[in-house]
Image (tube, rainbow, N blue to C red):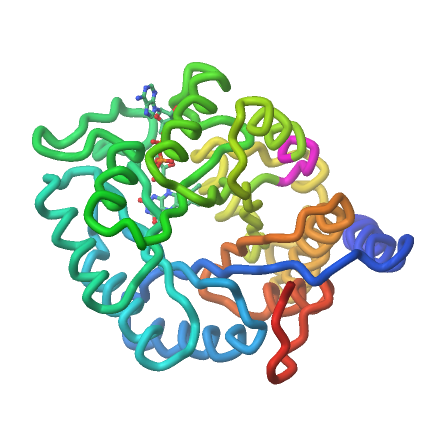
């Protein structure tokens, strides 16, 4: 039980350590489009639970190579119709001609969407294989951002950022150049790949600022609902999972309840420490589940009180 005790005490220490943090943070939530009616019902329970926390926006991912094109659109359209949340549609340009992508953007625009998370997408052959742009397509996120802005300058565009660099990037300098180019093309916010060591994020933001990039670099926070599964997934995308984190989940393979408490404690500790360092904007990878993210937001001071708006 030692790992649990350590995680909990860190969280409690972060919660009670020193003066209250200056202002309520802004939060956003990421969902994935549900595959089945059952998953859709569960996503909507999650949305209803999280909506009163007044996120700045909620985003819906886009499956590799456009595999969820219709489901992403349907989820976004329902959010617009049935809630007062501001949806952001993820869009990748892998495997599609410019015309197809432009049509998707136009359809979103007509539906009322004014925020797109613009991404290149993973190579069609999977991570680790070379990326081949579609012969008539946008070659990557930089061109995609410019393409969206050319179609509709009033669409807000967010992009990705990698505190541990993108696995394909030769070095940090290239990645920072790419981020700068995405900003020059019109991106106004970057959301990071998840990370578990806050120093990586702080160092990265220092490098980004030194490169002359001024847009918000919003930390992407992933509560590890299922540690083993999540570790495989995030490691492939270039995130380091530190030994201390693995130790906290040791011996809990058959104990989902305790795993959940540990995951909430770890992520709450991470965001509270970032908040103390002045970070006031968080993007949560919810995995379509409300419980952990709701608890973590609560620990950040956010309450579902009617009319409460984050700073
Ligand atoms: C917040 C977030 C949300 C995501 N959502 C989705 C999603 O919904 N669907 C999905 O399929 N994937 C998603 N991804 C994953 C993303 O698609 C992959 O990480 C993909 O491999 C890279 O896409 P990107 O837009 O980050 O690429 P980019 O930022 O364009 O960069 C990719 C790599 O190519 C290099 N590069 C790019 N342009 C150049 C150039 N001109 N010269 C040299 N090197 C270059 C960069 O340095 C980097 O190494 C998301 C990632 C993040 C962080």
Magenta stretch holds residue 199: yes
Q: Quadrant of ligand 1?
A: top left
- Magenta stretch secondary structure, dominant: helix
* 263 vs 145: above or below: below
Q: Nearer the viewer, residue 40 or 169?
A: 169
Q: Residue furthest right?
A: 18
Magenta stretch holds residue 260: no
* 290 vs 233: above or below: below
When asked about the image quadrant of residue 13, the answer is: bottom right
Image x and y of residue 150, in percent = 22, 43
Query: What residue is rendered at 46% in x and 45% in y?
Result: 189
Query: What residue is rendered at 41% in x and 75% in y?
Result: 42
Q: Residue furthest front?
A: 153
Image x and y of residue 86, in percent = 41, 67
Residue range of the region highlighted in magenta in the rendering:
196-201
Please state if 46 lies on the left or on the right of 133 as rendered.
Answer: right
Please state if 39 lies on the left or on the right of 108 as rendered.
Answer: right
Image x and y of residue 55, in percent = 53, 66
């Amino acid at each position: 039980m030692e790992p649990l005790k350590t995680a909990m005490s860190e969280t409690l220490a972060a919660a009670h350590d020193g003066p209250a943090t200056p202002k309520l943070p802004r939060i956003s939530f990421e969902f994935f489009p549900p595959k089945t009616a059952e998953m859709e019902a569960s996503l909507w329970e999650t949305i209803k639970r999280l909506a009163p926390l007044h996120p700045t926006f909620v985003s819906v991912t886009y499956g590799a190579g456009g595999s969820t094109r219709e489901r992403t659109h349907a989820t976004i359209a329902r959010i617009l119709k049935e809630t007062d949340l501001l949806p952001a549609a993820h869009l990748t340009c892998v495997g599609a001609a410019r015309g197809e992508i432009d049509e998707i953007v136009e359809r979103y625009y007509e539906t009322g969407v004014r925020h797109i998370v613009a991404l290149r997408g993973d190579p069609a052959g999977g991570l680790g294989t070379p990326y081949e742009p579609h012969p008539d397509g946008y070659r990557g996120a930089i061109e995609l951002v410019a393409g969206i802005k050319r179609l509709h300058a009033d669409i807000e565009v967010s992009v990705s950022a990698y505190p541990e660099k993108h696995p394909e990037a030769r070095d940090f300098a290239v990645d920072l150049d790419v981020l700068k180019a995405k900003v020059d093309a019109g991106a106004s916010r970057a959301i990071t790949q998840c990370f578990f060591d806050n120093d990586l994020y702080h160092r990265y933001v220092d490098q980004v600022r030194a490169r002359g990039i001024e847009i918000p670099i919003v930390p992407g926070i992933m509560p590890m609902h299922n540690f083993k599964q999540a570790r495989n997934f995030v490691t492939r995308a270039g995130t380091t999972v530190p030994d201390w984190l693995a130790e906290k989940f040791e011996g809990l393979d058959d104990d989902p309840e305790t795993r959940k408490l540990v995951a909430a404690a770890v992520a709450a500790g991470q965001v509270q420490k970032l908040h103390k360092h002045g970070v006031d904007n968080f993007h949560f990878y919810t995995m379509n589940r409300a419980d952990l993210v709701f608890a973590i937001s609560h620990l950040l001071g956010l309450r579902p009180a009617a009319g409460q708006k984050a700073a």
